[in-house]
Image (spheres, rainbow, N blue to C red):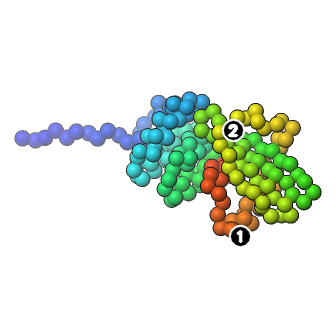
Amino acid sequence: MREAVKAERPGIVSADRPREGPFADLVSRIAHDSSALDGFTFAYSELGTEGRRGLIRAVVQDIPDPGGALGALLAVESDAALAADLAGLLRRHGQTQGYATLKRRQSGGEACLIRPGLGFAYELLRIAWNDNEIELIEVESGLEMNLVAAEDRASVSATVELVAPFLWHHIRRDGALPDGVERFAGFFSVT
């Protein structure tokens, strides 16, 4: 007797499924629905390496603006290779909707890059320097946007252009940046 062959259920990255369907709708909700965000990141973190790679591909292929979803995945990724891949994709595809502040002093200054974080909070990357040497690099999470004074706001592109050489110098000298800095990669993407 011949057994019936059960057709496999198409995977999440099936090439012949519609590109802006329920998956894209779910991912678009993560920006303002904390339960959707929790479910999305939990499901991702429960997948094996190949499953996580597949979900990352689906996000890049199906989501018109995948930056927020890539950032959410990067925030929960523990595998160094996948985190590096996500940071690269975020630089390439992330249209970071963020803000910058800049305070200059005679021989130094302080700059902050502020990005939407998980749920309704914001994350801040603070870089302070004196005499062309970085004194402080830190990431703060869970901030409310109203904590940033409007008079301190600066151009994101000008701030990034100012701090990028400091960060490269720090990497060459000290080897690594603090954990969490990779989530700000979208600010440094070439547009």
In this rendering, the label closer to the viewer, 1 or 2: 2
Q: Is residue 161 visible?
A: no
Residue at the far right in the pictured view: 106
The answer to whether 115 appears left or right of 77 in the picture is right
Q: Residue at x 59, y 38 (%)?
A: 118
The foreground one among 110 and 83 is 110
> Could you tell me how far apart the alpha carbons at marks 1 and 2 are, in whole angstroms?
30 Å
Residue carrying label 1 = 173
Specify the amino acid type for callout 1.
Arg
Q: Quadrant of the N terminus?
A: top left
Q: Is residue 3 visible?
A: yes
Residue 45 position by quadrant? top left
Provide residue 96's location: percent of width, then percent of height: 67, 43
Q: Mark 1 or mark 2: name the one nearer the start of the chain.
A: 2
Provide residue 81's location: percent of width, then percent of height: 51, 59
Q: Residue at x 83, y 64 (%)?
A: 132
Q: Residues within 10 Å of mark 1 (few under 14, many from 20)?
A: few
Q: Residues within 10 Å of mark 2 (few under 14, many from 20)?
A: some
Q: Residue at x 65, y 57 (%)?
A: 178
Residue carrying label 2 = 143
As drawn, the label of residue 38 is none
Secondary-structure class at tag 2:
strand
Specify the amino acid type for callout 2.
Leu
Secondary-structure class at tag 1:
helix
